[in-house]
Amino acid sequence: MSVAADFEALYGASPDGVWAAPGRVNLIGEYTDFNDGFVLPLALPHTTVAAVSRRDDNVLRLHSADIDGGIVQLAADALEPLSGGGWAAYPAGVVWALREAGHPVTGADVHLTSTVPTGAGLSSSAALEVVTALALNELFGLGLTRPELARIAQRAENDFVGVPCGVMDQMASACAEEGHALHLDTRDLSYRQVPFDLAAEGLRLLVVDTRVKHALGDGAYAERRAGCEAGARALGVKALRDVSAVHLPETLARLGDETVLRYVRHVVTDNARVERTIALLDAGDTRAVGPVLTEGHASLRDDLRVSCPELDLVVETANAAGALGARMTGGGFGGSAVVLVDTDRADAVAAAVGKAFAETGYAAPGVFPAVPSAGARRV
Ligand code: ADP
Ligand code: MG
């Protein structure tokens, strides 16, 4: 059944509209988004689709086809941050953040379903937030821009759900365009659509979902973030974005703490790798992006130390099997990797990774091509 038909079966009336927002993969620029840096994500064909009707009685009803359990009913005018609520905290947080920003959102009925894998580092959470924000923006005539909606979605995740994420995921889901990667400056949210037509160049970007999520990752993000902030303070800059990659060894020599030094080196070099990648894409040399990805992986593994054996195995095996390059993507400690590969080598590379996982005793990874797709929209 369609999402609209399911909505009607659930709530007894057809929805005011149906909206979709995609998950994303980040091509390069990892852990740079809370350092005012650059990122280069692309939207996936996988989307969270929500049927939504406006209400004016402060009743907020939320239902996900993907979660066992019934309708979650909340009072739109009495939402409390960090009060739990499981999955419903994501869309409820969007209502809360809109109201906090002074927008009169007086309730809604929401029914949604998603094809974005959850917890795979492909940002099902941002897809859920952005689809909710876009629907409410239209239904309540708020007139917010895409970057403004992304900020609302980020605020929902940071302050209502309680996850200290940057703004990349929400911006990618809200602003991406088909056939492009999004060059985003996370300092001012300015962005540019960079042509990324893989098929025309005989290339494929594979997403390999390791299907693992190591508990280690839970505290690691906050610890890396604090370390980067300490590095910026020690170097006297507003954010690590302001540290030049030129003369980096001399700059790093000013840092006493070895851990902070490694974090700073990762952020500064990964920021530079985003710029190198964009220069290559603009020059039509997508193949040459491969080694930049692999270099980025080494930096995440050795300097930031957020990789894990499963992600390292994907990168090593894919490259040994003839990929152009590969890296973990997202927060690490599990989740997904991206692999850039010639189309005619893609099956062989995927098979090699599957074989290596089986031989190591890991569960089979999920593999699919990342086709650069459209951002959030009404359907
Ligand atoms: P990621 O964003 O990498 O997929 P997160 O842990 O940030 O992983 O977000 C996943 C959470 O988002 C889920 O545990 C759930 O609470 C919520 N979520 C995502 N998609 C859905 C969905 N279709 N239905 C209900 N909740 C969802
Ligand atoms: Mg998430």
Image (spheres, helix red, strand yellow):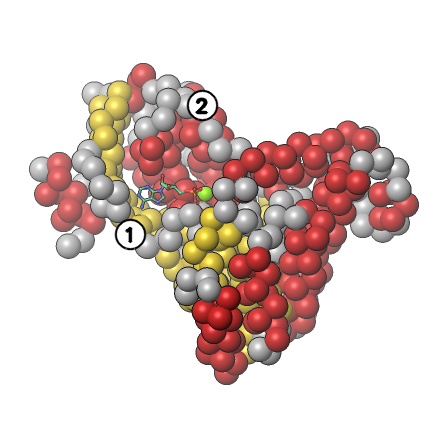
Residue at x 22% of width, y 23% of height = 59
* In the image: residue 178, left or right of residue 86: right
Name, please, the residue furthest toward the bottom: 344
* Position in image of residue 136 (x %, y %): 32, 34
Identity of the residue drawn at 38% across and 29% down: 93
Q: Which residue is mark 1?
A: 379
Q: Is residue 308 above or below residue 351?
A: above
Q: Quadrant of the N terminus?
A: bottom left
Locate residue 185, reporting x and y percent.
Answer: 63, 45
Asked if residue 158 can be seen in this view, the reply is yes
Residue drawn at 58 percent across, 38 percent down: 221
In-front residue for pair 143/43:
43
Q: Amino acid at mark 1?
A: Val
Q: Residue 101 got which mark? A: 2
Decide which of 26, 131 is in the foreground and name it: 26
- Quarter of the rendering containing residue 72: top left
The correct choice, above or below, for 334 with respect to 359 in the image is: above
Location of residue 19 with respect to 364 vertically, above or below: above
Is 167 above or below relative to 89? Answer: below
Mark 1 or mark 2: name the one nearer the start of the chain: 2
Q: Where ligand 2 lies, by image quadrant? A: top left
Q: Position of residue 73 (x, y in %)?
A: 22, 27
Number of residues whose C-alpha sits closer than 10 Å to that of mark 1, classed few (under 14), some (14–19) or many (20 or more):
few
Q: Which mark is residue 305?
A: none
Inter-mark Cα distance, 1 to 2: 27 Å
Label 2: few (<14), some (14–19) or many (≥20) C-alpha neighbours in 10 Å: few
Residue under the point 47% across and 26% down: 159
